[in-house]
Image (cartoon, rainbow, N blue to C red):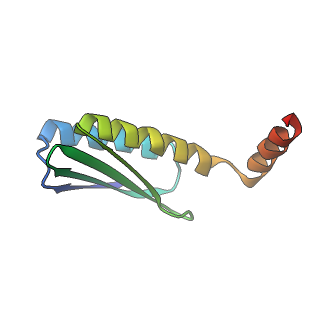
Amino acid sequence: MNIVMQLHRAAVTDAQRAKYERMVKARARKLSGAVQATVRLSEDGDQRRAEIVLDVARLPSIVVAAEGRWFATCVGLALDRLDARILKAKQTPKTRARRSRAAASRR
């Protein structure tokens, strides 16, 4: 699995970069077929933005983003959103249909 870090006017230390790479790699292992991840960090004044694009074989790319005042907050929010998208992508069509029938019967 290949991880590409793109920094746009972002002051990120090597330790932060390595930590973010490890965090993304751990999330990508949850989904079989993950080919490449691109982490984009940008800074504009006091506003930071983190965007993670996970390229997966046989599925559309998973794109998540978050904005905030600190990179740690942005990356954490983006990873939480990535976890939710990975869980949704891992569900089989049969499981999705079963869950929707169960939700409909509760109404």
Please name the residue shown 33% across and 52% down the image. Answer: 51
In the image, residue 4 sits, relative to residue 15, either above or below, namely below
- 1 vs 8, left or right, is right
Toward the right, the furthest residue is 105
The number of discs equals 0
Please name the residue shown 53% across and 51% down the image. Answer: 32
- Asked whether the viewer can see residue 79, the reply is yes
In the image, residue 73 sits, relative to residue 7, either above or below, namely above
- 3 vs 14, left or right, is right
- 41 vs 102, left or right, is left
Q: Where, by quadrant of the figure, is residue 75 drawn?
A: top left
Q: Where, by quadrant of the figure, is residue 78 drawn?
A: top left
Quadrant placement of the C terminus:
top right
- Residue 66 horizontal/vertical position (percent): 36, 46
- Residue 77 horizontal/vertical position (percent): 38, 38
Query: Residue 72 or 87: which is nearer the viewer?
Result: 72
- Asked whether the viewer can see residue 26, the reply is no
Quadrant placement of the N terminus:
bottom left
Query: Residue 4 or 51: which is nearer the viewer?
Result: 51
Please name the residue shown 53% across and 47% down the image. Answer: 85
Query: Residue 105 or 57: which is nearer the viewer?
Result: 105
In the image, residue 72 sits, relative to residue 95, either above or below, namely above
- Residue 36 horizontal/vertical position (percent): 38, 58
In the image, residue 28 sits, relative to residue 35, either above or below, namely above
Please name the residue shown 77% across and 42% down the image. Answer: 99
